[in-house]
Image: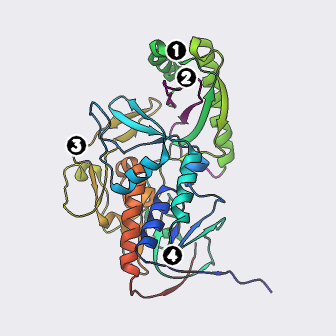
Amino acid sequence: MSQAEPILSAHVMVAGAGPAGLAAALAAARNGANTLLVDSHNEVGGTVTHAGICSVCGLFAPDRPYPEYVAGPEAIKWAKSLGGHVVRMGRLFVLTLNPGAFTATARGFLDDCPNLTICLGCRLKSGMRLRVRVLVDCTGCAALAHLLGRSVRQTEPACPALGFRISGVDLKRLAPGCLNILRHLEKEAPGCLFRLYPDFSNPGGEIPGFLNLPPVIRPADQRSLYEKALRELERILTLLRAYQLGFRMVNLAWVAEEIGFRSGETIVGEDTLDIDLALNETSDQEQAHSWWPVEHWTGTTGPCFTYPGPAGYLITDGCLMSPGEPPLFAAGMSLSATSKGQASSRVIAACLDTGFRAGTLAAEAASGGQTYDIYLQD
């Protein structure tokens, strides 16, 4: 006789423990809801932890002479706890990030939060039984919405990302030729985006960076894609050693344990984040925004960017709500968006802010709400 699947029970269940899911679970629990956070990995942090994301994007206004916070209070709270240093990247500022620091910060917030249970190593699948009032999908690919039979939207092919850290770089020799090196690499590695975040105040330290491969549809065999990214990374480091004195002794000090994807499926919500419309929208309500530019990947030329206006892109509450019962909210890369909308709202700051908003709305919906017995199905 087969053993019955356990029942996952809570007032609010949040699926996915990346930035969006962490913020959603914390918000729901702090607002009094008995909250359960589940994730298939054995550690919290999602793509940040497991794919080695090394920068927090979307915190600061673009086109300013100095870093100026424009993200919501939840993202700013996390940023001030993470450490790191601010780096200028063309028209943008980003905060460098050590994935270990993100995990430690998350653990600190979770440990101090009442009403919250965490279930790691728990992969939601067909046949599982839930007893909940409200659900929040922060899986990054609307996986929970799939299992509930809700409508989902396929966005454009994903951009695989791999985080790493390098050592042995002579920063004193970097500045004059850095742009020329990157231009050369664009020719040698077409379609790839290779970016480093050096801290010139710490010349002997390791330098974080990431590599994006050209967009691909999410593969069944992610291990082969990971190995392809490793080969591409080693090839780029070989080019750097050959073409720039500052990189002659460069070594790969650390690389993430898996490859991350920068897009996926989304819920079909009551509203949809459409950048062409959201650019001109404003609201006095406590709704989320994103200030990160939209990345367009065209062929093998790499990304180009469309920048928001001074008010950013408005992400209405309807973008976080899936019609139907039980109540289902979504945040981060799972929220209802076009491909362009997802390209802006996927960054860490927007994930934290949309997660916080979705968790707050979920707690409100769970207060005195109906309890549902649900069987997940493919």
For label 2, the crowd category at 10 Å Cα-Cα, with few meaning under 14, some 14 to 19 and many 20 or more, is some
- Magenta-drawn stretch contains 214: yes
Residue at the spot of label 1: 172
Contact (CB < 8 A) between labels 1 and 2? Answer: yes
- From mark 1 to mark 4, how far is it between C-alphas? 51 Å
- From mark 3 to mark 1, how far is it between C-alphas? 37 Å
Tell me the chief SS of the magenta region.
loop
Q: Which residues are magenta?
A: 193-220
Q: Secondary structure at mark 4?
A: loop
The x, y position of residue 163, in whole percent, is 58, 39
For label 4, the crowd category at 10 Å Cα-Cα, with few meaning under 14, some 14 to 19 and many 20 or more, is some
- Magenta-drawn stretch contains 44: no
Q: Which mark is residue 309?
A: 3
Q: Which mark is residue 203?
A: 2
Give the residue displayed 58% in from the left and 49% down from the top.
Answer: 49
Considering only order in the chain, which callout, 2 or 4, is on the residue closer to the N terminus?
4
Q: Quadrant of the N terminus?
A: bottom right
Considering only order in the chain, which callout, 2 or 1, is on the residue closer to the N terminus?
1
Contact (CB < 8 A) between labels 2 and 3? Answer: no
**Left or right of residue 212, residue 221 in this image:** right
- Between disc 4 and disc 3, the foreground one is 4
